[in-house]
Image: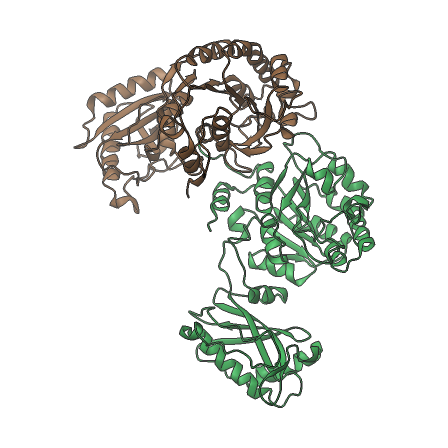
Chain colours: A green, B brown
Amino acid sequence: MDDMYGNLMSSLAKPSEQRIVLLVMDGVGDCDNAGKGTALQQAKTPNMDALSKVSGLGLHIPVAPAVTPGSGPGHLGLFGYDPIVFQVGRGVLSALGIEFALTPRDVAARLNFCTLDKAGKVSDRRAGRISDDENKRVLAKVRAKLKAPAGVEVFFETESEHRAVLVLRGEGLDDHIGETDPQAVGVEPLSPTRAPYDTSKTARMVGDIVNQVRQILSDESKANMILARGFAKAPNWPSFAERWKLNPAAVAGYPMYRGVARLLGMPIAATPTTAADVCAEAAKAMKNHTFVFAHFKYTDKTGEDGDLPGKIRRIEEMDAALPKLLEAKPDVLLITGDHSTPPSLKAHSWHPVPFLMHAPHLRGGDGPRFNEVACRSGQFGTILARELIPMALAHAGKLEKFGA
Amino acid sequence: MDDMYGNLMSSLAKPSEQRIVLLVMDGVGDCDNAGKGTALQQAKTPNMDALSKVSGLGLHIPVAPAVTPGSGPGHLGLFGYDPIVFQVGRGVLSALGIEFALTPRDVAARLNFCTLDKAGKVSDRRAGRISDDENKRVLAKVRAKLKAPAGVEVFFETESEHRAVLVLRGEGLDDHIGETDPQAVGVEPLSPTRAPYDTSKTARMVGDIVNQVRQILSDESKANMILARGFAKAPNWPSFAERWKLNPAAVAGYPMYRGVARLLGMPIAATPTTAADVCAEAAKAMKNHTFVFAHFKYTDKTGEDGDLPGKIRRIEEMDAALPKLLEAKPDVLLITGDHSTPPSLKAHSWHPVPFLMHAPHLRGGDGPRFNEVACRSGQFGTILARELIPMALAHAGKLEKFGA
């Protein structure tokens, strides 16, 4: 697996004052909702419709055909990092989700609090879904009493309910560590140092930590043990600024998306959540940044809830907010999603995602609307998500010629 | 970096008497010219229109999405050599541009004559843009006096104005040589043997040559020194004839395109420049060759000049000339460009390039015209340039089945 295309495009990127805005309506793509049309088709979007008539349209494939992406891979693709080459472990995604500032010396894992019975077997893999407060209380106790293995720092961070994040920081750590979650009740937690993990120094440290936690929590009735999975080293990737010669900023109200942005060294300019605020803050961030990533969560949230009318309303909110962003006159404005989230599926999906690019040097305006069907016959065709930033750079005049 | 697709297709190619003609209207693709349409859309092209109705249409991406190709990579793609795998250094491209017959033992560099002041600092990186004649006079002096380093031949060739080409020929030469052009005035030329180039024997030879040239030209007022960049070894690639089992010929009036053809071992059948002559010579070359590459330069030249009416006129010239080529009845006729050159950009661009393939075994005729918009919905879809020759071979019956 190499990154030939990304490396080539990165080598051609050159800085300039042109502004690129990437507006992500999370999970915006949809299915046809029993023939009534997609959320974008059903929504009343006069501003996007008008824009589509003077813009190029297309569909993007977030990761690869038929792949349903998580939020991490979905956004990495949009940022021009092939999600198959740039893979993030689950532990790292959990750390990003709570905006834990990972360094390249870190190994992260997802934790579940669980309940062990008297025989030491897992009786509840989620410790009765304890409250966030309970989670915090128990973790405070662990933090106070745990003796970190020599040469490492250990971080325990609350996520929500029974979920937490473990991070080890030190020199020369590896992530060749056995998952301790047996994924079943009535059995003991697995050992992190079982074969083939018995050669890992870091696995032995995790074994020590898990044993200490078990001692420290032995007087708890619910959360008396932890289960760990998804051990992963923090990646040491080229920053977005280096890779694309852009001065980027993120405008995102939800921790996960700020986390992905931070992983690529993108500073956070603002944390709005409503469509109006996302557009207003993106317009502001354009003053000092040549690239603005603006994230709107609710199109995904309504999709995950199976709430089609809600999804339509959220799209209409964004449409109404759009003029504020257009006033700031980005040189290239890319409107799209990181994946599809059809309300009929109540989940992310693999469907290609519509995108609109308002930019110089087009081949006419496509339109007449911005939705899955109009985008199918747009001038950009169906491309990979990782090709979107290079295409935006091309239209913004930010790429050198290849060869003389 | 591999050439899996190219190797596969090459292994399937088989010889036959069928004739393929590749007619390149250099830089033919365009943007929408403020809503008035592309040059192809605006041109009156009754012959191409008629042909498009009995041909397949499509768009090709010369190198990769969003990449603006130079002439070298643009043509390598058309010839079925992935331009990312088959990369040519700038020195080699310059040598091709003057049709210098490179061998695999050669290292080439681009030269600029420059002016040094009395302190030895660059005062003019282009030596006052001396005339071609002045360039030739000065190079004759260098040739007469230079003592070639032991074991190598040294060639100095005029390109135009202040530009020239340096070629070293010998056994075991490398191209790990520092560029001597400081890309600024008021500073001294750089040493070709500075670290990390101090390990290269060839770099030391170049250092010796540069010092000699400085002595030889010390009495010149303008061109009293050379600056060298883009040191590159001549590639040793499979010839077009071997790769595709074709007996090829090039019909091209401009040195750069003959140079690229020669790099692939393609002999030059004729050097016409007008549309009428290009078509007439291509028709003639078909008698003795199973593949004819015919090149028309002026669609690119007018694009680079920002001359939209000129570009439209040049397309119309080619349209008028086309019947002469059609009379010769090529089995497969491919009409396209090597990249787009929108007059609005006055430069090459990244936009996909329309192509027309008149061939047996189509799925109907596409049409109704040959232009960027008609090609977007053509039967070939949007493909990579390097897939065009394999597709032409397929339609010409020149490919074996894959697998039993």
Quadrant occupied by the N terminus of chain B: top left
- The answer to whether residue A148 is visible is no
On screen, B202 above or below A23? above
Exactly how many numbered labels are in the figure?
0
Q: Residue at x 76, y 54 (%)?
A: A344
Judged left or right of residue A249, residue B73 is left
Answer with the quarter of the image where residue B95 lies: top left
Query: Residue pushed farthest front?
Result: B404
Answer with the quarter of the image where residue B225 lies: top left
On screen, A39 above or below B272? below
Answer with the quarter of the image where residue A16 lies: top right
- The answer to whether residue B119 is visible is yes
Picture coordinates of residue B346, whole percent (x, y): 56, 25
Judged left or right of residue A69, residue A314 is right
Judged left or right of residue A38, residue B113 is left
Q: Nearer the viewer, residue A233 or A188?
A: A188
On screen, B332 above or below A102? above
Judged left or right of residue A148, residue A315 is right
On screen, B116 above or below A60? above
Q: Nearer the viewer, residue A321 or B142?
A: A321
Quadrant occupied by the C terminus of chain B: top left
Picture coordinates of residue B264, whole percent (x, y): 37, 27
Picture coordinates of residue B183, whole percent (x, y): 40, 36
Query: Residue pushed farthest left?
Result: B150
Q: Nearer the viewer, residue B139 or A1?
A: A1
Q: Residue at x 56, y 59 (%)?
A: A263
Picture coordinates of residue A144, whole percent (x, y): 58, 84
